[in-house]
Amino acid sequence: MDSRLWKGIRNRLSPLASQPEIGLDVFSVATDNPNMTDRKDTSLTGLAAEIGMQRPFGFPELEAVLNVIRTHSSLTSQATKIFKEHGISEPQYNVLRILRGHGTPVSVYQIAREMISPHPDMPRLVERLEVAELVTKTRCQNDRRVVWVNLTKQGKAILKKLDQPLGDLHRAQLGHMSEKELRQLSDLLFLARHPPND
């Protein structure tokens, strides 16, 4: 695979969602990539037609990876606007959801493990939530290295405000798919993240 293309894909998928908005400049690289077949095709469909390619993809793995990137960008961009309207970011929302799910204080280490998209600086992320009075922090008496994080009333309130608009958004985005198709999609994405020998 072309080194520029691989670098672009790796940067966007390691981790995929650690970037709230993934740039799509990788597609311009994909279009001119020598790994594409030399045959020109005027009846392209799917992603190839969507991004204006002149030739089909040379191998299905590349098309699948780029489809994931483009879909991630499309789905998350709208959610990001909703988070911004409520004064928080996607990673901050993820932290609040984790805390609400547990219902009890959770260590920063455990929050980091349960994040949908790994964050490079969890202590600072939690600190910003504390400044906004959405969480409180308490250092463990038995192990000073452990910091417990608890959801405040304000944190619960902002989650409640977000539940409806986010639920409506997700249903609008994927409501055209059947429950069976959505389950198949989830299963395939899980399989993609967990190869048999992983």
Image: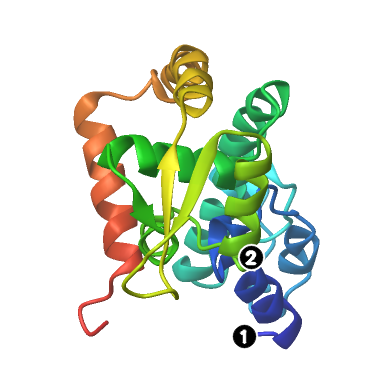
> Mark 1: which secondary structure?
loop
Identify the residue shown where x is 22% and y is 38%.
Answer: 183
| Between 86 and 164, the one nearer to me in the picture | 86
Q: Which mark is residue 174?
A: none
Say which quadrant the N terminus sits in: bottom right
In screen coordinates, is 29 left or right of 118?
right
Answer with mark 2 or mark 1, whichever residue precedes in sequence: 1
Q: Is residue 92 above or below residue 195?
A: above
Residue type at mark 2: give it: Arg
Q: Is residue 114 above or below residue 163?
A: below
Q: Is residue 129 above or below residue 177?
A: below
Q: Which mark is residue 12?
A: 2
In screen coordinates, is 179 left or right of 72?
left
Count how many numbered circles sit on residues in the image: 2
Label pair 2/1, CB-CB below 8 angstroms:
no
| Between 95 and 174, the one nearer to me in the picture | 95
Query: Visible in this render: residue 194?
Result: yes
Which colouring convention does the figure follow?
Answer: rainbow
| Residue 18, quarter of picture | bottom right
CA distance for labels 2 and 1: 16 Å
- Tell me where residue 38 appears, x and y as whole percent: 68, 73
Say which quadrant the C terminus sits in: bottom left
- Tell me where residue 130 appears, x and y as whole percent: 61, 43
Query: Visible in this render: residue 56?
Result: no
| Residue 8, quarter of picture | bottom right
In screen coordinates, is 109 left or right of 102?
right
- The residue singled out by tag 1 in the image is 1
Residue type at mark 1: give it: Met
Identify the residue shown where x is 22% and y is 85%.
Answer: 197
| Between 16 and 101, the one nearer to me in the picture | 101
